Amino acid sequence: MARDYTKYTVKGVGEKLNKRQLVFEIVKNWAAKKKPSLKVMTNTFKDEIQGGKGFIRKNAEVKDPNRFNMQEPLRIKNGTKVVVSNQWGTKNIANFLELAKKLGYKVEALEAEATKKEAAPAISPLTKEQIAEYKERIKDDVDGNYDDNSYYALRIHDDLVEDGDIAWADTIIQNVVEACKDFRSIETVCEKLLEREEMDRFWSMVAKAEAMAEDSSDLISLADVVEESDSTKSEALLKKAEDKAESVGNLINIAEKVEDNNKDWATKIYKKAEGKADGLYDTKSLAEAVRKIDQDWSVKIYKKSEALCDYAQDYIRLAEIVLEFDKKWTVELLKKTEEKAESFSDLSELGAAYGNSDGLANKEKAAEYFEKAFPLIDDQWDKDNLLEAAKECLGMQHAFTQKMRKLVDEAKPKLKLAQQFFPSYNLAWGKEITLNLANGPSCDTIEYFNIQLNLETNEVVGHVEADDALQRWFGEWEVGIYDGYYDHKSYDGVVRIFGEDENGQQWCIVGHNVFEEVEEGELPNGATGEEIWDVLGNGKAIFELYQYIKINGE
């Protein structure tokens, strides 16, 4: 099967990105702008877009680190760290491109550059300054150890390829191959060669990686690498992986990969997995996988899962799954949860399970268990999460939600402003708004920062438990707008403005000197994007606000 070598360019995000880079950079960009909760993140980037192997996961909960970008976790709301799937090919990238378009990203597909197959020039195309910089990086990051520091070496390889010095990049790869003794590094070399369309060397490295594979997980991972280049070779690797598989998780993984093309083979593997499944996690995972090919069989396995539940959280997790096809059974599971729920997490999650607007939508039960969770609140994380659950299940006007809003608001630091920077703002649009602004080039790791304002009290609303003034008032440890703005004393970059009306309806508009579009939600009370932009998009006022916070926020 011919491999798709398409590269992608996304305005304001990146150029000549391969599939993995495209997905990661867009998710990173979106998360930096939105600062979403984990629930919003996973509801936006759903597993089915990736294909069922997982799209977004908490950094600490990843079961198979080879399938996620573990080196670059993203920080979202409440400091949660998440990682992004690196499993992308021709089949599932189309799903992601459709999502990217809905999110407002303009993705341009580029044909692979033929120059990557050409021989490297005899003389390096790099400048003396670039050569010195690369030598310094190799000295500092690799330090002669291409085994332990292979990750950094291969990043240098990528940059050399991008800058056109293929010969030096090849030297880096050869050093890694000669030094590395582990499967993962050689597999990564395979991926690099595949990206460069060096197919003879690629297949040579695949053979080396296969010989180094220690277990079923290694073979499954290698099968993913070769899938789009040779589906027959990929299936052969999966067959070897099946023969070596000891865990239920690996058997499920293999079955999911083959079920579209060979349902009989997948069924055989699932049956083998059922014979091995003896714990709650295994049985739930197996039941969820089997649902796609046999609903009745899946229910039988879920019944086995119920018999293995010991704690409140076990019943809640199972109830959330069962809710999709059996509400009566869901209620029975939640009643059993009530008998075991004791901790804050037990009680708050039980309330959310009852109040889920897409499920039972039982506000009375939800409020009952949120109230029981309230006295057990331990930290700011508990407060924030209970408030989010109350807003979703009970609505903004419910007495418990208002109580939680007051509690959360009182804990946040406030910086009183000496003047009203946006005097024409209509409070009916929402008392609190957030300005999302772009960092300048001096901030090379953080692209955006936020300023949250309470326009009724004329205060900057800060972040609890921040380590310094920048994190307290801007939500980032690195903040610095483009130097050129200082000359004109006016912010001249892209501005995203987020708001929330009294009913909890969130909205966002975006503009660059002028209003461009409503990016999400519905604007409140018949307001137009142009009206809100005219009041809040003033570059001079934004710059002065930024300066005031920097000077007075220490």
Image: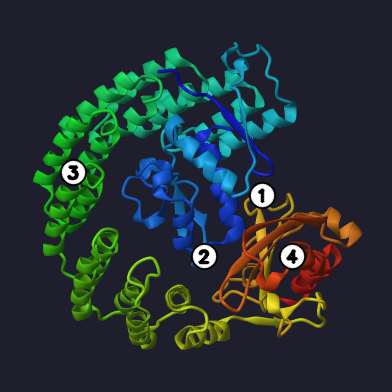
Earlier sequence position, callout 2 versus callout 1? 2
Q: Position of residue 143 (x, y in %)?
A: 51, 36
Q: Which residue is drawn at the image coordinates 62% and 68% (left, top)?
A: 471
Place residue 539 in its image quadrant. Answer: bottom right
Quadrant in which residue 168 is drawn? top right
Residue indicated by mark 1 = 444
Mark 1 or mark 4, which has the lower sequence index?
Answer: 1
Is label 2 in a helix, a strand or a loop? helix
Which marked residue is nearer to the observer: mark 3 or mark 4? 4
The residue that disc 3 covers is 247
Query: Badge 3, how many Cα within 10 Å: few under 14, some, many 20+?
Result: some
Q: What residue type is labelled 1?
A: Asp
User: How far across and how far down the image is residue 241, in percent?
Assistant: 22, 31
Which secondary structure, mark 3? loop
Which residue is disc 2 drawn over? Answer: 77
In this figure, which residue is indicated by the disc labeled 4?
528
Place of residue 499 in the rendered image (x, y in percent of width and height, measured from the top left): 65, 70
Q: Which of 472 and 327 is in front in this view?
A: 327
Question: Which of the two labelled residues, at mark 3 and mark 4, occupies the earlier sequence position?
Answer: 3
* Mark seen at residue 124: none
Camera sees residue 537: yes
CA gap, disc 3 to disc 2? Answer: 34 Å
* Residue lying at 69% horizontally and 60% vertically, measured from the top left: 509
Q: Which of marks 2 and 4 is nearer the N terminus?
A: 2
